[in-house]
Image (cartoon, rainbow, N blue to C red):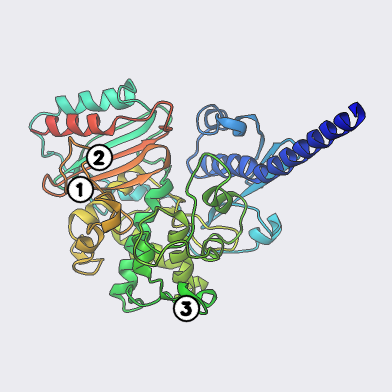
């Protein structure tokens, strides 16, 4: 009898260990992939140091135990944890990409006709297309705003760890501040603020007559089931009904997509329907990557596709710093991976504060901004078309008609149309530990402008 009990306990123990091993093995691409991708982009695009990124950006959970090697000659980062390993490679015009289902050599053979160069000459061109600001700014007294800048950058007084802070008032930056090692030329990660750029690119597709966002998205894999009725509008407004788990804290759809998969949009499109199309709002990075995948198949060839965001949006806004990263399949990651300077994010805000017009040119369709800020009913005032809203007064110190771009770890672009004001905050402010008090920050900015 005792022998049977011992055997039973041993079997349970072995089964538990095997299950734990299988689960841990499934986490390794996420652990090592997160470290490799984020370290590579921070080093090769932002120009930050490995030690700083390891101390701040990837210093959490199992990810802080990765062993990372930066190869400056080949522009790769290799991250290892236990028996897991991931490699991220930097390529001009593509940014940094995790190697998934290809080799480094295969990825290096892919070429892009875009990419950043030395644009210091823009310092001689007036704002907003250039960086030369007016000699006389629109503030009679900068003292209060300077105090806010010192609180957020110098003292971390609002919580979190802001890298940069900019206030744009009446279309012109009136105050900006940066952490040591970061400046107005440093490209910083958007995280999910990139979704709002996908909104802009979708608007341009509509303006050019390439899309009807209310027509079925027409993905081949959706043709034989109820997913066939999903529209680009449903995807922009996060009401596709597709099953999705956006939990960043564990093994979820979004973490698997970003760190294990090679085709992000294809992975998201493979999900089954969980709710009726167009009825339930649920935030999904997968939905945005499906849009980017559809955009790639709509445009006539990859040469045009890779230039589209630059020729039709970034360059027209003077966003000379922008880098739009791609997944291993070559599709731009519109859910998460744009790098740009703080001023360039402010230029993007100006486009939406001016109803889609920039430097005299109507970039977005007329009425597109109104469409963007129309709330999704099931979101209870929190969301529009790939922009967050304040109609739910989640930030009570700000007006209800404020809208915003929001990204993981505290990336924000706040747009306040009645005040003709935008506030940009970029950095590393992890939730549940030391998240930033954005409501207090906005209250202080508005008070300083009175």
Asked if the residue under mark 2 is in contact with the one under mark 3, i.e. CB atoms within 8 Å, the reply is no
Where residue 376 sits, quadrant-wise, is bottom left
Of residues 47 and 11, the one drawn nearer to the viewer in this rendering: 11
**Quadrant position of residue 173:** top left
Marks 1/2: CA–CA distance: 8 Å
Report the disc number at residue 300.
3
> In the image, is residue 108 above or below residue 209?
above
SS of the residue at dot 3? Answer: loop
Q: Are marks 1 and 2 in contact (CB under 8 Å)?
A: no
Q: Check the picture and name the quadrant holding the C terminus.
A: top left
Instruction: Tell me what residue is drawn at x 34 percent, y 55 percent.
Output: 196
Residue hosting label 1: 391
Q: Which residue is mark 2?
A: 394
Q: Please name whichever residue, 109 or 253, is drawn nearer the observer in this view of the structure.
A: 253
Label 1 or label 3, whichever comes before in sequence order? 3
Question: Could you tell me residue 349's position as x and y percent?
Answer: 26, 50
Lower sequence index among marks 3 and 2: 3
Please report the residue visible at 45 percent of the width from the left and 76 percent of the height from the top: 228
Q: Is residue 17 above or below residue 363?
A: above
Judge whether residue 332 can be spotted in this image. yes
Residue 210: image quadrant is bottom left
């Amino acid at each position: 009898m005792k022998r049977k009990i011992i055997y039973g306990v041993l079997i349970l123990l072995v089964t538990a260990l095997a299950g734990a091993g299988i689960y841990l093995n499934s986490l390794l691409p996420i652990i090592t992939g997160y470290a490799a991708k984020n370290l590579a982009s921070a080093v090769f695009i932002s120009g930050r140091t490995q030690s700083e990124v390891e101390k701040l950006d990837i210093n959490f959970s199992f990810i802080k135990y990765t062993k990372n090697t930066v190869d400056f000659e080949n522009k790769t980062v290799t991250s290892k944890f236990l028996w897991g390993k991931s490699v991220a490679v930097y390529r001009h015009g593509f940014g940094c990409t995790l190697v998934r289902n290809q080799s480094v050599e295969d990825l290096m053979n892919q070429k892009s006709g875009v990419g950043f160069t030395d644009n210091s000459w823009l310092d001689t061109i007036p704002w907003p297309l250039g960086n030369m600001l007016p000699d006389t700014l629109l503030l009679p007294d900068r003292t209060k705003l300077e105090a806010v800048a010192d609180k957020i950058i110098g003292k971390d007084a609002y919580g979190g760890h802001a890298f940069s802070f900019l206030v744009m008032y009446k279309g012109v930056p009136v105050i900006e501040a940066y952490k040591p090692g970061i400046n107005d030329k440093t490209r910083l990660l958007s995280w999910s603020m990139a979704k709002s750029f996908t909104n802009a690119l979708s608007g341009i597709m509509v303006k050019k007559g390439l899309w009807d966002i209310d027509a079925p998205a027409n993905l081949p894999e959706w043709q034989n089931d109820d997913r066939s009725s999903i529209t680009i509008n449903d995807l922009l407004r996060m009401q596709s009904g597709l099953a999705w788990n956006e939990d960043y804290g564990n093994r979820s759809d979004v973490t698997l997509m970003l760190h294990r998969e090679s085709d992000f949009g294809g992975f998201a499109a493979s999900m089954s329907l969980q709710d009726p199309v167009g009825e339930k709002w649920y935030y999904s990075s997968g939905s945005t990557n499906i849009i980017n995948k559809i955009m790639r198949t709509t445009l006539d060839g990859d040469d045009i596709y890779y230039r589209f965001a630059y020729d039709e949006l970034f360059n027209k806004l003077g966003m000379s710093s922008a880098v739009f990263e791609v997944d291993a399949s070559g599709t731009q990651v519109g859910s998460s991976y744009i790098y740009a300077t703080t001023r360039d994010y402010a230029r993007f805000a100006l486009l939406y504060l001016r109803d889609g017009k920039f430097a005299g040119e109507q970039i977005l369709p007329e009425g597109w901004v109104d469409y963007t800020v129309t709330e999704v009913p099931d979101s209870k005032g929190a969301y529009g078309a790939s922009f967050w809203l304040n109609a739910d007064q989640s930030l009570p110190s700000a007006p209800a008609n404020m809208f915003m771009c929001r990204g993981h770890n505290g990336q924000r672009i706040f747009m306040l149309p009645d005040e003709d004001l935008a506030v940009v905050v970029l950095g590393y402010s992890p939730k549940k530990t030391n998240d930033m008090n954005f409501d207090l920050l906005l209250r202080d900015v508005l008070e300083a402008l009175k």
